[in-house]
Amino acid sequence: MSLAGEDLINIRRDLHKIPELALKENKTHEYLKKAINDFPQEFLEVKEFPELPTALFVHINGSNPKRTIGYRADMDALPVTETNDLYYRSVHPGVMHACGHDLHMTVALGLISYFAENQPTDNLMFFFQPAEESESGGKQAYDLGLFSGKYKPDEFYGLHDNADLGTGIIGCRNGTLFAGTTEVNVTIHGMSGHAAYPHKANDAVVIAANFIEQVQTIISRSIDPVKCGVITFGKLEAGTIRNVIAGKARIEGTVRGLNQQMIEYIRQRIVDVAKGLEVSFNCTIDVEFNQGGYYPVENNPELTKNFIDYMSNAKDVKFQETEPAMTGEDFGYLLSKFPGTMFWLGVASPGALHSVDFLPHEEAIIDGVNAIEGFLKYRMSM
Ligand SMILES: CC(=O)N[C@@H](CCC[C@H](N)C(=O)O)C(=O)O
């Protein structure tokens, strides 16, 4: 590899300090551009698009190309306040790389730096993607037609770090790797009033509590126990002060299933529950869903078999076959358009993904670059 392990760790720390939310990845974009500008430029072309200004595309000319191999790294962070006591902790209050996208970008930079010095035989295309956590940056790029010409991959790869896998382990499976998700927003319209006169109001807090409880029974009582689904409400807002009955409540959540049929079934049952509560509480409940590009992540059978064959036989690569996970990814949308493979990179974090104390083992970056560099060379030899 061209960037040394220590360089990669420093890059990841720099990126970790400047986390930015979806579609606001401006400093991150500038940092990546500058880093790529320091690599040998002979085979490289960097492309920006005003329609999706924080995205960054890099093309590396192959010496005798049979195909263009795409590689995607996501860029955005989460509205989470980091509790890790690190000299490189986030300098952006309330925003944290709690999902490891700083590490994903660093792995991609490691690969670019290697192939900028060692011309690949096939063309390589790197897509630094804004907005994975929300707003579906991958879908936006596709719908804007940005994957065209030199930037159209014949096959597409991408990784996600995994807090529960040992450091540097590559995890993958054929078929469905991640769930499809749908964001759900619920607004409950009751009637505000004095805390002492509940009969003259319609308490949106009580309705919200009933809604949340009843919706959870969809998972426990409505779906076949040997199949699976998840409904999580991560945000609930209602009321202004203890002695005023809230007239309105807003609930935001996410619905997940390993196939589209399950997602649609759960969505329908949520609507049914809302309709029932409208009658029983004499209120109005608006329910909105937004799937965006968060389709189930379906790995391509042939390419993924090839990927697993390489990773499980390569000397110096630790590989583990993994189960499907209920995490979501808009790479699922891109894999519905281009064949490819998504895989895990183990980072053995004591804190879970999306938590305030997520702390990946950085050595995984070096293992990741080595494993993927080896795989790309193997793939290009075919
Ligand atoms: C890997 C990961 O954590 N991805 C996110 C994707 C978010 C999907 C969407 N905004 C939703 O919440 O449904 C995840 O939460 O799994």
Image (cartoon, helix red, strand yellow):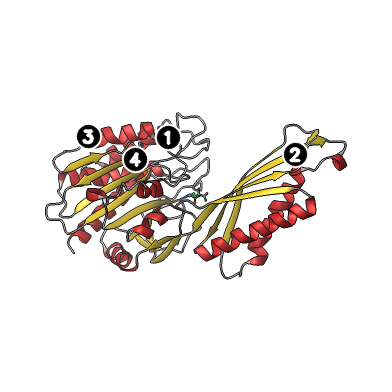
The alpha-carbon separation of the residues under discs 1 and 2 comes to 34 Å
Check disc 3 and report its element: helix, strand or loop: helix
Left or right: 310 in relation to 287: left
Q: Earlier in the sequence, mark 1 or mark 2?
A: 1
> Mark 3 and mark 2 in contact (Cβ < 8 Å)?
no
Q: Earlier in the sequence, mark 2 or mark 3?
A: 3
The alpha-carbon separation of the residues under discs 3 and 1 comes to 22 Å
| Res. 340 image quadrant | bottom left
- Residue 111: x and y in percent read 25, 47
Q: Disc 1 vs disc 2: which is toward the camera?
A: 2
- Residue identified by numbered label 3: 37
Q: Which quarter of the figure is the C terminus placed in?
A: bottom left
Q: Disc 3 vs disc 1: which is toward the camera?
A: 1
The alpha-carbon separation of the residues under discs 4 and 1 comes to 10 Å
- Residue identified by numbered label 1: 24
User: Please, is residue 18 above or below residue 348 in the view?
Assistant: above
Crowd tier of the residue under label 4, counting other residues whose Cα lies within 10 Å: few below 14, some 14–19, many 20 or above = many
Please give the name of the residue rendered at 53% of the width and 53% of the height, measured from the top-left corner.
Answer: 182
- Residue identified by numbered label 2: 247
- Residue 267: x and y in percent read 59, 58
- Residue 325: x and y in percent read 48, 59
The alpha-carbon separation of the residues under discs 4 and 2 comes to 41 Å
The alpha-carbon separation of the residues under discs 3 and 4 comes to 16 Å
- Residue identified by numbered label 4: 55
Please give the name of the residue rendered at 18% of the width and 55% of the height, measured from the top-left corner.
Answer: 122
> Mark 1 and mark 3 in contact (Cβ < 8 Å)?
no
Amino acid carrying mark 2 in the image? Gly
Q: Earlier in the sequence, mark 4 or mark 1?
A: 1
